[in-house]
Amino acid sequence: MEISLQQAAQLLQDGEVVGIPTETVYGLAASVEREDGIRKIFALKGRPSNNPLIVHISCLEQLKDVIVGELDNDTLALARYFWPGPLTLILPVHPAVSKFVTAGLTTVGVRIPDHPLTRELLDLTGPLVAPSANLSGSPSATSRSHVEADFGKDLPVLEGGFCQNGLESTILSRSKEGWQVGRLGAIPIDVISVVLGYEPLSCVHGSRPICPGAFYKHYAPQARLYLSSMTPYEKKMGPIVGFSNRNYPSEASFISMGSLEDPLEIARHLYATLRKLDEEQHSSAWIDVDFNATGLLATVHERLMRAASSVFHTEINQLINLI
Ligand code: TXA
Ligand code: MG
């Protein structure tokens, strides 16, 4: 249900949950100060309570209510360069922030989203927690209609158009050796390396994932996905999900994610394409994952591998490393 900015601010201050647009994906927001609203997010999504939420702020001033300590030069450089934008930094949490937000961790994920409506909303409400606005395990939502498909038309949503990036924020966390990637995302790692002056450690470094979310099934449609890297195409596998600049067997029906020459176009269409498989009631599909997984396409590749897999993080990460 489309609502106005003022209605959204009021609902959030009253402890309700509102769908909000960001430049990455839509979020399911609640006020960081309203534990009742935060609990509703977990219940609506079916999200495990040990998976923490990202806090969204409108400006650096709002950081002081969310984290403890001053930002060091490295952190400030990242924040100044990438905010507002799709970078989440894991920082020491302020004691006033609810344990429901952090799942009891001593850190909190924070970012300034780059969407004019949502920043205006954040100016009115103060910090908002927001996971991606999809049922846990399902593809993320990049339009209001995706949010309503998962949560029903009665859920209040601030209409902000289609998401510009179409992939979630890149997550960075501090380790003794420097910044480490917690989740691949809308900012490619090579771009982050340029700003940092070194390449951050990979998210598959070590045995435990940095983000608890990496333990769970993610981005998966109901349709079973066959990976091109594992099996050649057969007609019984359903439509081919691939790229407009490639040729595929002519007997297959074809769903395009865009051209490999335009990675941003692919990123923008990724979740809508995965959702389309269920909208069109395909029981399975064959996905072309044989492309050079660099830059933004590294994130697209990782999302497709997770979408196709019901196995947990270690196995998926091994799979991603092998390719
Ligand atoms: O682009 C985005 O980041 C979107 C939009 C709405 O901002 N949000 C998003 O939230 O993707 P969510 O909840 O779908 O994914 C957040 C990820 C999860 O994997 C979670 O485990 C991790 O961030 N995370 C949150 N707080 C953390 C923390 N303190 N330490 C480590 N990982 C954390
Ligand atoms: Mg998510």
Image (cartoon, helix red, strand yellow):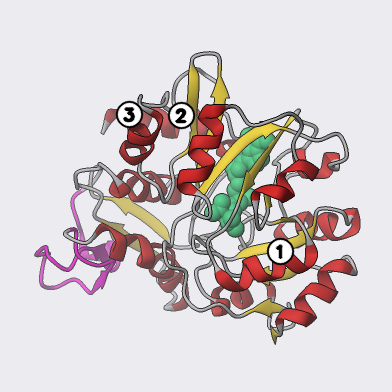
Q: Quadrant of residue 98?
A: top right
263 sits to left or right of 16: left
Q: Which residue is mark 3?
A: 321
Magenta-drawn stretch, dominant element (helix, strand or loop): loop
221 sits to left or right of 154: left
Depth check, mark 3 against mark 1: the one in front is 1
Q: Which residue is mark 2?
A: 203
179 sits to left or right of 97: left
Q: Which residues are magenta?
A: 232-260
Distance from disc 3 to disc 1, alpha carbons, whole Å, reads 39 Å
Residue kind at label 3, given as amino acid type: Asn
Q: Earlier in the sequence, mark 2 or mark 3?
A: 2
Residue at the image position 40 percent from the left and 30 percent from the top: 196
Depth check, mark 2 against mark 1: the one in front is 1
Q: Quadrant of residue 321?
A: top left
Tag 3, which secondary structure?
A: helix
Q: Give the image location of residue 218, x and y in percent.
A: 53, 49
Q: Give the image location of residue 232, x and y in percent.
A: 18, 50
Q: Is mark 1 within 8 Å of ligand 1?
A: no
Residue at the image position 73 percent from the left and 71 percent from the top: 18
Q: Give the image location of residue 85, x and y in percent.
A: 50, 54
Residue kind at label 1, given as amino acid type: Leu
Report the quarter where the N terminus lies: bottom right
